[in-house]
């Protein structure tokens, strides 16, 4: 049977990349983001590969609008097998430098918006009797990264939320997958001075879609070398962490 996937933040970057890989694999797609014209372009590009592509404008910081969009997409695609909670921002903002509004925006989109999307997805999955929730976190969830305090906090918070959902859905036909990318080449990180172990968006999103289809619980992306680097990051003293 043809499977369907909803992706938030699908207008560019990892969301658009995953959409291309899912389309190649014959999935029906619900693509959401704020930028309606980029979504329309992607819809036209993927129309010949995917059996059905629908697009919806969605700002995940407008929390109350999320459940209706998820329900509409499920209605139009005949249910949703997978919801990928991907929309996110990474705004550099150091503490005590007047950047609180940027930090709040980061938390609103990456944490509260992500939780609101995941909550709507789990409710839908319970009605359907099945489904897979996919949350995109980050290696930045491992530690509080310099000038990325709100970003690290948002990703660590969402990671813990996903773990709680995993605990709550034991015994139900609901899979919870957390993918924590390292550095995948997108607009999100192009301004950074250093992007260790960088992989292309094409490669990185191919790995992500493979992992999602396998129904893994948690993986770094790419898994190697990040599974090893993560163990080092966890114990790095602040004197070294501050240089990253
Ligand atoms: N690239 C990496 O190396 C990397 C590493 C770790 C984690 N991640 C995570 O992966 C996810 C995707 O990142 P990316 O690299 O693809 O970034 P990106 O190229 O900047 O794309 C971000 C996507 O999120 C959407 N978005 C931003 N704010 C939104 C909002 N308020 N409501 C709805 N959609 C919103 C954007 O669409 P609109 O602007 O059209 O709304 C866009 O489609 C993020 O959660 C990011 O934290 C990425």
Image: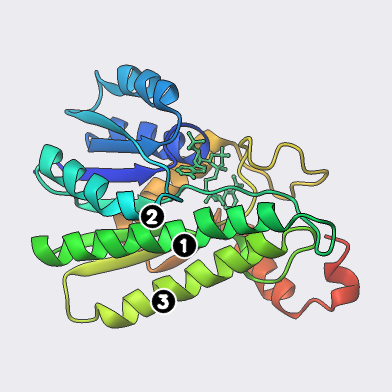
Q: Quadrant of the N terminus?
A: top left
Q: Mark 2 or 3, which is nearer the eye?
A: 2
- Residue at 49%, 67% in the rendered image: 158
Q: Quadrant of residue 150?
A: bottom right
Residue 98: % across, % down: 80, 56
Mark 2 residue element: helix
Residue 127: % across, % down: 10, 63
- Please tell me how crowded label 2 is: few (under 14), some (14-19), or many (20+) other residues with Cα within 10 Å: some
Q: Earlier in the sequence, mark 2 or mark 3?
A: 2
- Please tell me how crowded label 1 is: few (under 14), some (14-19), or many (20+) other residues with Cα within 10 Å: many
- Please tell me how crowded label 3 is: few (under 14), some (14-19), or many (20+) other residues with Cα within 10 Å: some
Report whether 112 appears left or right of 140.
left
Up-down relation of residue 36 to residue 162 (above or below): above
- The alpha-carbon separation of the residues under discs 1 and 3 comes to 16 Å
Residue topped by disc 2:
63
Q: Are marks 2 and 1 in contact (CB under 8 Å)?
A: yes
Q: Earlier in the sequence, mark 2 or mark 1?
A: 2
Up-down relation of residue 198 to residue 125 (above or below): above
Nearest the camera: 68 or 158?
68
- Residue at 45%, 32% in the rendered image: 11
Nearest the camera: 100 or 207?
100
Q: Quadrant of the C terminus?
A: bottom right
Residue topped by disc 1:
112
Residue 211: % across, % down: 39, 55
- Return the mark for residue 212: none
Residue topped by disc 3:
163
- The alpha-carbon separation of the residues under discs 2 and 3 comes to 21 Å
């Amino acid at each position: 049977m043809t499977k369907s996937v909803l992706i938030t933040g699908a207008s560019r970057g990892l969301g658009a990349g995953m959409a291309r890989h899912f389309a190649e694999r014959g999935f029906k797609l619900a693509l959401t983001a704020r930028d309606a014209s980029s979504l329309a372009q992607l819809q036209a590009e993927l129309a010949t590969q995917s059996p059905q592509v629908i697009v919806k404008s969605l700002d995940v910081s407008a929390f109350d609008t999320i459940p209706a969009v998820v329900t509409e997409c499920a209605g139009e695609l005949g249910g949703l097998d997978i919801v990928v909670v991907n929309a996110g921002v990474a705004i550099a903002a150091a503490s005590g430098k007047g950047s609180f509004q940027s930090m709040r925006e980061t938390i609103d989109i990456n944490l509260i918006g992500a939780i609101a999307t995941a909550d709507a997805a789990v409710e839908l999955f319970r009605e359907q009797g099945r489904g897979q929730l996919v949350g995109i976190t980050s290696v930045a969830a491992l530690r509080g990264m310099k000038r990325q305090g709100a970003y690290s906090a948002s990703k660590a918070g969402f990671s813990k939320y996903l773990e709680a959902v995993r605990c709550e859905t034991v015994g139900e036909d609901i899979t919870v997958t957390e993918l924590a990318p390292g550095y995948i080449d997108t607009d999100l990180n192009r301004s950074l001075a250093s992007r260790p172990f960088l992989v292309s968006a094409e490669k990185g999103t191919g790995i992500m879609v493979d992992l999602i289809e396998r129904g893994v619980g948690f993986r770094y992306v790419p898994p190697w070398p990040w599974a090893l680097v993560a163990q080092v990051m966890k114990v790095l003293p602040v004197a070294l962490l501050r240089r990253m």
